[in-house]
Image (cartoon, helix red, strand yellow):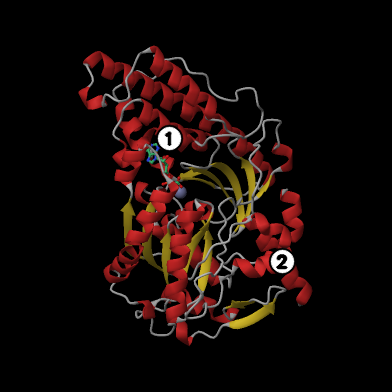
Amino acid sequence: MVRLFLTLSPAIFRLNISPRISILATSPSLRLQKHQKHRLITKTHTFSPIAPSSSIKFHSTRFHSTGTRVYSLPKSENSKFDDNLVVLGIETSCDDTAAAVVRGNGEILSQVISSQAELLAQYGGVAPKQAEEAHSRVIDKVVQDALDSANLTEKDLSAVAVTIGPGLSLCLRVGVQKARRVAGSFNLPLVGVHHMEAHALVARLVERELSFPFMALLISGGHNLLVLAHELGHYTQLGTTIDDAIGEAYDKTAKWLGLDLRRSGGPAVEELALEGDAKSVKFNVPMKHHKDCNFSYAGLKTQVRLAIEAKEIDAKCPVSSATNEDRRNRADIAASFQRVAVLHLEEKCERAIDWALKLEPSIKHMVVSGGVASNQHVRFRLNSIVENKNLKLVCPPPSLCTDNGVMVAWTGLEHFRVGRFDPPPPASEPDDFVYDLRPRWPLGEEYAEGRSDARSLRTARIHPSLTSIIRADSLQQQTQT
Ligand code: KG4
Ligand code: ZN
């Protein structure tokens, strides 16, 4: 399936947000992608003496079979504009509605997040329809607050960046629609952002020394990725999960232990684990005998559930009301789970670093990002692994590890600078406009020598990877010049 899409990728060359309908017109076999509507808004910033977006001349560099133009900034002017670029980033891929305004020099002008913690607690996880409604209720206010706190209006922006995948399509749609509206109304270019690339690249905003190539472990509620970042938009996937991600395992453990889910499961397990004995419950480290860099957390989840049943822990009784013994049992399970869950990360990271150094010997850094990277035990343990390999660990602060608008704005800036963006959409688009959303969108191609027999079966409805799209686009450019 992936191979089929790769051959089609020249028809969908763009990283950015094109009308889905035009993709369907040229690539009927992409019908597995969902039809959705979207619009985007972007702006130019008032701070800049020279570069409000309305003054930038967008050079149309090429036309594609979709009939869509791709524009790029005149290369010689890129550096001049750098510090003066201001990008609004919008993120709605899962359960947080987030927006931020970031300047080209990395200055965070504002950051706003509306979390759906109450819904999470109520449904015991993310319910897509309810999450979509919650995003729709707050998106206008979140974006407005981000602009207000930055003391800017849309007219001050250079571009709008928005997450287009991977994630829940119902939720992605809300952010993309908002972004297109802003961009259309204020004649701003748009950048469609890969959520996992954004988790990785925000580390470059935090750590200025961090240059390509580098390694990244991206750990969140839905993803467990080990990637080698060769350059912007070019990634090799060294490992992924064959079933659940570590964040999902934290969330279920929290739910079954009767923890308060209002801050999401991970922080609740981390806190309770501090009271427990991490060696008291014997859980097996997953995939010990697989000499690859893939992950599996489904089996560990089952081990945890069985341990909870064996101790007759009642999830309906909140931990705050548990007896001392019951609380200690829960804390022991939390601590033992966390120890083994992180040991699994450690083992795979060690191997992945060895592989990566063979491919790119100049690597100096390992980024650990995504919601689970806010965990102190994760940071501490991975730091030793990374230092033993003579690399430096780069972990964004917790507020930039969990989903946020800054990472989207920053990734938008990185691509915008090199000319990867869509021109402003029309000021008004029909209600049945079809959006380019990419709910299942790999970041890079799989490292061939790292393939194992334990493979994900979830290959249906997958979009060509970000890396393959960008490569196909570059090849097309080369043949045109
Ligand atoms: O990156 P993120 O905010 O959203 C997704 O893209 O999924 O990650 C959310 C995940 C959730 O599973 C949450 O429980 C987990 O990150 N998480 C943590 C911690 N903070 C958030 N897991 C362990 N320890 C934490 N302190
Ligand atoms: Zn995330």
Q: Residue at x 42, y 74 (%)?
A: 182
Badge 1 local density, few (<14 within 10 Å), some, or many (20+)?
A: many
Residue 214, can we see it? yes
Question: Where does residue 248 sit, x and y in percent of width and height?
Answer: 46, 36
- Mark on residue 11? 2
Q: Secondary structure at mark 2?
A: helix
Label 2, label 1: how many angstroms apart (C-alpha)? 41 Å
Q: Pointer 1: what residue?
A: 378
In the image, taking residue 284 as reference, residue 105 lies left or right, namely: left
Give the amino acid type for the residue marked by disc 2 in the picture.
Answer: Ala
Residue at disc 1, CB closer than 8 Å to ligand 1 = yes
Labels 2 and 1: the sequence-earlier one: 2
| Residue 407 position within the rendered picture, expressed as x and y whole percent measured from the top left | 44, 57
Q: Could you tell me which secondary element the residue under label 1 belongs to?
A: helix
Against 256, is 403 above or below?
below
Q: Residue at x 33, y 26 (%)?
A: 273
> Type of residue at label 1?
Val
Give the tally of numbered discs.
2
Q: Residue at x 38, y 84 (%)?
A: 49
**Residue 85 seen in render:** no
